[in-house]
Image (spheres, grey):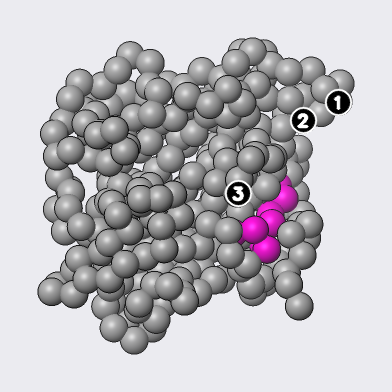
């Protein structure tokens, strides 16, 4: 029987609430902070709403091809001519365990990913923060993996008591450099100066936790100790994104950050994304 896309897990702590959609990529479908709804709840595709995990690659994978240790394989071209955001964006995730404020989910990286592997996600809601942790396991042999999150925040936060919209979101992120991208949104190998106002920018050497704030509404501080890059995206009329990444788009193949991280049997790759407020 097909998974029910409408199924939601409900977490609460203090004045904060989260809903999780296990059947739609295990994503965070909503986040309410002090009465303000801050995460975009719908979009034309499943890549345009909620906060979802990207694995075992982030962003675009050039021509859907991976070359690693003398082996090459092709992934489905989900945004032709490239493969976008990994293999677990819109697949059903299994619910392993839940409580009033915590959800633990799991998904396979297959069947298209050539190495047996899985990903575990633990979402924990506190009164002043959301902690989102992932681990990628190699079940048989080593494989490369770049991990990340793609949170879609509302351009205007919505106050649920009276449906009042805030002023447009303000993104604050300070970086040492910006990855130059080609017309397909893939790294050219060059670094350039960061823009004053990011549009669709891959940023390196971020010097302090990024912030997204809505005048008259909430302010969120974003942290990810394992993030080696952040994407700041503000080109959509209804949403903005601040995405922590452990590597770069197409980072399974080539990257200024060097070889991709490797998941080994018994040695999973892990990363954490924290959203704080208050």
Horizontally, is 52 left or right of 98 in the view? left
In the image, residue 149 lies at what x, y percent? 46, 48
- Viewer-side label of 1, 3: 3
- Magenta stretch: give its range: 18-25
In the image, residue 238 lies at what x, y percent? 61, 26
- Number of numbered markers: 3
- Residue with the mark numbered 1: 161
- Residue with the mark numbered 2: 35
- Residue with the mark numbered 3: 46
Mark 2 element type? loop
In percent of the image, x 29 and y 83: which residue is there? 141
* Mark-to-mark CA distance, 2 and 3: 25 Å
Vertical placement of 177 versus 9: above or below? above
Horizontally, is 133 left or right of 156 in the view? left
**Residue 90 visible somewhere in the drawing:** yes
Q: Quadrant of residue 197?
A: top left
- Is the C-beta separation of discs 2 and 3 under 8 Å? no
Which quadrant would the C terminus be assigned to in this image? top right
Residue 22 counted in the magenta span: yes
Q: Earlier in the sequence, mark 1 or mark 3?
A: 3
- Is the C-beta separation of discs 2 and 1 under 8 Å? yes
Which quadrant would the N terminus be assigned to in this image? bottom right
Vertical placement of 97 versus 153: above or below? below
Mark 3 element type? loop
Other residues around mark 2 within 10 Å, as few (<14) / some (14–19) / many (≥20): some
Residue 54 counted in the magenta span: no
* Mark-to-mark CA distance, 2 and 1: 7 Å
Considering every residue shown, the one lying at the far front of the view is 81
């Amino acid at each position: 029987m097909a998974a029910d896309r409408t199924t939601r897990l409900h977490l609460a702590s203090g004045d904060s609430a989260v809903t999780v959609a296990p059947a739609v990529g295990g994503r965070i479908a909503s986040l309410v902070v002090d009465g303000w709804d801050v995460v975009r709840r719908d979009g034309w595709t499943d890549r345009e709403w909620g906060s979802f995990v990207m694995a075992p690659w982030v962003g675009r994978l050039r021509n859907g091809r991976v070359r690693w240790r003398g082996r090459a394989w092709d992934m489905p071209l989900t945004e032709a001519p490239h493969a976008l955001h990994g293999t677990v964006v819109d697949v059903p995730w299994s619910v392993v365990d839940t409580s009033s404020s915590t959800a633990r989910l799991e998904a396979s990286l297959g069947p298209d990913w050539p190495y047996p592997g899985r990903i575990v996600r633990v979402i924990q809601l506190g009164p002043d923060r959301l902690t989102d942790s992932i681990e990628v396991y190699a079940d048989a042999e080593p494989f490369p993996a770049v991990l990340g999150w793609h949170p879609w925040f509302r351009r205007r936060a919505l106050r649920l008591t009276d449906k009042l919209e805030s002023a447009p979101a303000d993104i604050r992120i300070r970086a040492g450099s910006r990855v130059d991208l080609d017309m397909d949104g893939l790294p050219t190998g060059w670094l350039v100066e960061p823009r004053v106002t990011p549009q669709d920018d891959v940023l390196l050497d971020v010097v302090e936790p990024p912030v997204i704030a809505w005048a008259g509404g909430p302010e969120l501080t974003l942290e990810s100790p394992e993030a080696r890059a952040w994407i700041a995206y503000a080109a959509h009329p209804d949403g903005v994104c601040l995405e922590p990444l452990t590597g770069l788009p197409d980072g399974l193949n080539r990257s200024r950050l060097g070889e991709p991280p490797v998941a080994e049997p018994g040695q999973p790759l892990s990363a954490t994304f924290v959203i704080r407020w208050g």
